[in-house]
Amino acid sequence: MAGAALVGLALAACGGGTDDGGTPEAGGGGGGEVEVFTWWAAGSEKAGLDALVGAFDEQHPDVTFVNGAVAGGAGSAAKDLLQTRLQAQDPPDTFQAHAGAELQDYIDAAQIEDVSALYDEFGLTDAFPADLLDRLSTEDGAIYSIPSNIHRANVVWANPTVLEDNGVDPEATYEDLDAWMADLDKLKAAGVTPLSVATTWTQVHLLETVLLANLGPEAYTGLWDGSTDWAGADVTASLEDFEKLMSYTNTDRDGLDWPEATQMVIDGNAAFNVMGDWAVAAFEEQDKKLGADFTAFPVPGTDGTFDFLADSFTLPVGAPNPDGAKAWLETVGSLEGQVAFNKAKGSIPARTDADPADFSEYQQTAIESFGSDTIVSSLAHGAATPVATLNAVSDATSKFTTGASDLATYQQELAAAVQG
């Protein structure tokens, strides 16, 4: 998507009290305006933001929400503008970021505050699962964001009518990528687009699921901690599978973003799409029913693994209204805020005390999986690597999928990107 203009750049500076460490005092929400910077500008993302704002207005009627949303797939446009503002010492009061390694660049640049004290203040230490808290915490135990949700990245979305009409069993299950690609071959021979994809970040998203499918959760995680060799034969085989999967995709992919690629499946113009479970809202908004109009299953080879990412909110250093930011963070972590937000967005709450019955059929399966599956961190969505690493991976992937590099060069560039 093209970038959209930022709303509400000029805000009244309305600072709140701080403790000796520079973070807001307990009990904040001292009025004024709070600029909330996100990339939730359209579709289910905007619906989720609107629902969260509704909960915020009820919990903190003395603080005025100011929408700082910037459009762009996976937040690329927003992150560029945000970095410009942070470097100019013009931060919003709070900004959206993916929880995990994506935050490291902001931490290293001393651009965000440790908010771990707020976890005790808001009762989040008991409300969030221990595994999630571990993934949010740095080595010294600090936590720099509060998650609003949990998303699963390794999901295949399918149109059962397209499959059945072209000789593929819509109820088929696939143990691995090879079994799935056999059906993709059938669809391609029938003249159907087997697999829809969009611009570069969606291709990186597909890449991470291929790596996970072939390497398994332990070796996949090893790609990011250095224990798995990027030059190894298993990675080469995974890149070969990625190359083959890209051969099944639509030729106009680089001009699309994820909603258009998902819509191809909804409209019957493609059979499959690999996308995070924010896509479920796109189906449901158009009155499509799980099991009848669309199906969803883990990327072949990844069943039993939950490829995790979470949207979260931070407290920037120098926030104009830190007490207003704290009020927003309180709503983000609250049961009421998480239920309202996730029902609209299609993700699941980070809290364990939410009632699964309040959510859709798909969301209930995701809640169950998150509680029982092996959890790994998403590459494309900031959980596994810092921003600079992801940018280098994205650049290498774009070169490869547009024909500007061969597979051997691609593998070398990926290794260099991750190893720095």
Image: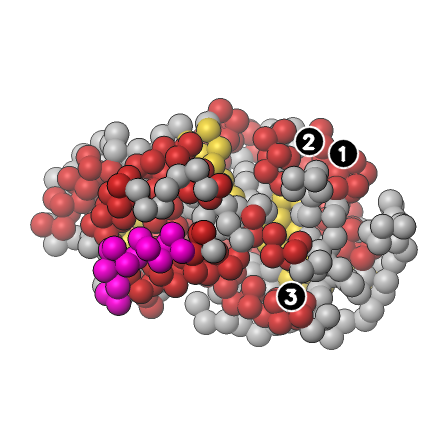
Identify the residue at horizontal 40%, vertical 56% (top origin).
416
Report the Cα–Cα distance between label 3 and label 2: 28 Å
Q: Could you say which quadrant of the image residue 321 lies in?
A: bottom right
Say which label, 1 or 3, has the lower sequence index. Answer: 3
Which numbered marker is on residue 68?
Answer: 3
Is residue 17 or residue 104 the one in the foreground? 104
Q: Are marks 1 and 2 in contact (CB under 8 Å)?
A: yes
Counting other residues with Cα less than 10 Å from the Cα at mark 2, is it few (<14), some (14-19), or many (20 or more)? some
Say which label, 3 or 2, has the lower sequence index. Answer: 3
User: Element at badge 3?
Assistant: loop
Is residue 48 or residue 252 the one in the foreground? 252
Q: Amino acid at mark 1?
A: Gly
Count of numbered labels shown in the rendering: 3
Report the Cα–Cα distance between label 1 and label 2: 7 Å
Which numbered marker is on residue 127?
Answer: 2
Instruction: Please give left or right for residue 71 compared with residue 227 in the image.
Output: right
Q: Amino acid at mark 2?
A: Ala
Identify the residue at horizontal 78%, vertical 63% (top origin).
318
Region rendered in magenta: 403-416
Q: Residue furthest top?
A: 372
Residue 96 visible to the viewer? yes
Is residue 217 or residue 268 the one in the foreground? 217
Residue 209 visible to the viewer? no
Front tag of 1 and 3: 1
Which residue is disc 1 drawn over? 123
Query: Residue 282: x percent and y percent?
Result: 42, 51
Report the Cα–Cα distance between label 1 and label 3: 28 Å
Q: Is residue 322 magenta?
A: no
Give the main secondary structure, helix, strand or loop, of the magenta stretch: helix
